[in-house]
Image (cartoon, rainbow, N blue to C red):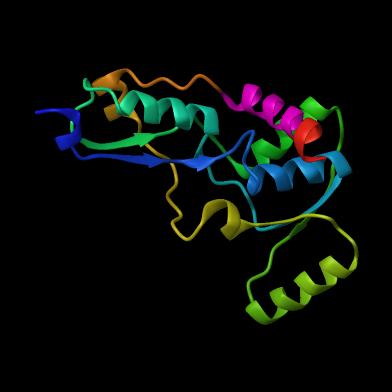
């Protein structure tokens, strides 16, 4: 059986790192401007992956040695707050963070409007980070045992690369 006859499914965790124009860009922009508003707690650990690691995993999975199946691909686990704290340390800054916790949709909509009127550049929503599925920690043991998956980029390296990417290519 050749590799073209196999069905291999990759379940990749959320992107965080260079070339990510969603979450990474927003957090880097807020850190550089040293102000942000966070709506939600951002205390739950979830799995993240550097886009370069995701590309490496796809190349490895195209190899004939990988068996048919579904594989979780992840780089590191961190909370949204840990992502922000790590970028702050790398940027040598202290970002003014306004934390907002709302439970009533009507009040939440009014506050969002006020926050945007106050001129805060960035808002990071709890649902934007975590999505609708609240269990976002991936087990990569199957990929590790089947084809020795090991990410190359951890939280600190990815954060440094992200800030460099933002400063050199986005600003």
Residue extending farthest right:
118
Instruction: Compare residues 80 and 73 and report the one nearer the observer.
Output: 73
Seen at 31% across and 28% down, the residue is 61
Image coords of residue 1 (percent x, y): 9, 28
Residue extending farthest bottom:
106
Image coords of residue 40 (percent x, y): 65, 58
Tell me: residue 67, above or below residue 105: above
Image coords of residue 87 (percent x, y): 74, 32
Residue extending farthest left:
1
Q: Which region of the structure is painted magenta? A: 154-165
Query: In screen coordinates, is 73 left or right of 129?
Result: left
What is the count of numbered marks? 0
Query: In screen coordinates, is 22 left or right of 131?
Result: right
Query: In screen coordinates, is 164 left or right of 24?
Result: right
Image coords of residue 82 (percent x, y): 65, 36
The image quarter in which residue 24 lies: top right
Seen at 54% across and 40% down, the residue is 15
The image quarter in which residue 140 lies: top left
Tell me: residue 111, above or below residue 28: below
Seen at 45% across and 41% down, the residue is 13
Q: Is residue 122 magenta?
A: no
């Amino acid at each position: 059986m050749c590799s073209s006859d196999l069905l291999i499914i990759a379940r990749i965790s959320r992107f965080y790192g260079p070339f990510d124009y969603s979450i990474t860009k927003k957090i880097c922009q807020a850190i550089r401007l040293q102000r942000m508003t966070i709506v939600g707690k951002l205390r739950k650990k979830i799995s993240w992956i550097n886009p370069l690691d995701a590309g490496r995993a796809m190349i490895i999975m195209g190899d004939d040695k990988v068996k048919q199946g579904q594989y979780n691909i992840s780089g590191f686990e961190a909370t949204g707050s840990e992502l922000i704290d790590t970028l702050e340390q790398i940027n040598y800054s202290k970002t003014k963070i306004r934390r907002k916790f709302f439970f009533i949709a009507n009040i939440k909509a009014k506050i969002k409007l006020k926050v945007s009127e106050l001129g805060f550049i960035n808002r990071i929503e709890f649902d934007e980070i975590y999505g609708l599925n609240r269990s976002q920690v991936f087990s990569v043991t199957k990929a590790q045992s089947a084809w020795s998956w090991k990410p190359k980029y951890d939280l600190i390296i990815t954060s440094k690369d992200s800030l460099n990417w933002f400063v050199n290519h986005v600003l």
